Image (cartoon, helix red, strand yellow):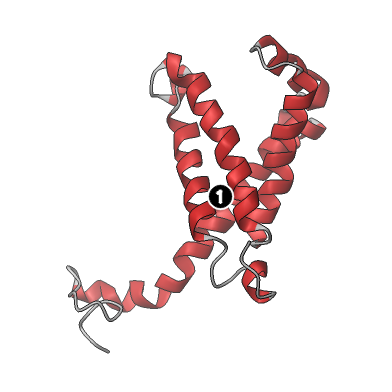
């Protein structure tokens, strides 16, 4: 095994750790994509179906309308479907880029919506939405990668 990283000619800072992270490196991107997608799914299930303690479509629509997103039912449905179905698509890597673009758009809107509350999520801030928006944007740029349905069918959308 070479003492350089991935053929770049750079030496690892912790050479002993290379035996651990080099074999795991191909799994890093799929792990980010799968976990990002799967973490969106329950939020969509809350909005659409009332699962996991969510209010369902009617309550979510009322909440969106109260926040000024009218018609509330349209926005609740769009965001719920983006989280639920888009999350599944991102996780399996099918239509990865379009699903991630949709998620990036709604999460960027959430960032703007929460900015008035400051940074920290515990006080209603935007840190959580920002992290997810950046992850979704990175997935939109990079695509599904090696272990995705997109790659398996020979398409990168």
**Residue at the (31%, 78%) spot, across then down:** 6
Determine whether the residue tagged by mark 1 lies in a helix, strand or loop.
Answer: helix
Residue 63 in picture, x, y percent from top left: 70, 16
Question: Between residues 105 and 20, which one lies in front from this camera angle?
Answer: 105
Q: Label 1 crowding class (10 Å Cα cut-off): few <14, some 14-19, many 20+? A: many
Q: Is residue 40 above or below residue 9?
A: above
**Residue at the (56%, 53%) spot, across then down:** 35
Residue 19 in picture, x, y percent from top left: 31, 79
Q: Is residue 80 above or below residue 119?
A: below
Q: Quadrant of the N terminus?
A: bottom left
Question: Between residues 113 and 43, which one lies in front from this camera angle?
Answer: 113
Q: Is residue 140 above or below residue 52?
A: below
Q: Quadrant of the C terminus?
A: bottom right
Residue 144 in picture, x, y percent from top left: 57, 63
Residue pointed to by mark 1: 36
Q: How many marks?
A: 1
């Amino acid at each position: 095994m070479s003492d350089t990283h991935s053929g770049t000619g750079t030496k690892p800072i912790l050479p002993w750790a290379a035996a651990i992270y080099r074999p795991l490196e191909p799994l890093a991107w799929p792990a980010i994509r799968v976990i990002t997608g799967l973490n969106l799914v329950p939020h969509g299930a809350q909005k659409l179906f009332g699962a996991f303690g969510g209010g369902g479509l009617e309550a979510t629509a009322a909440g969106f309308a109260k926040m000024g997103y009218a018609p509330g039912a349209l926005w609740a449905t769009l965001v719920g479907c983006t989280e639920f179905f888009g999350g599944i698509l991102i996780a399996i890597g099918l239509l990865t880029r379009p699903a991630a673009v949709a998620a990036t758009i709604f999460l960027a809107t959430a960032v703007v919506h929460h900015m008035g509350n400051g940074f920290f999520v515990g006080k209603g801030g935007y840190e959580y939405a920002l992290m997810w928006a950046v992850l979704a944007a990175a997935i939109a740029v990079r695509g599904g990668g090696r272990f995705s349905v997109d790659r398996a069918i020979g398409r990168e959308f």
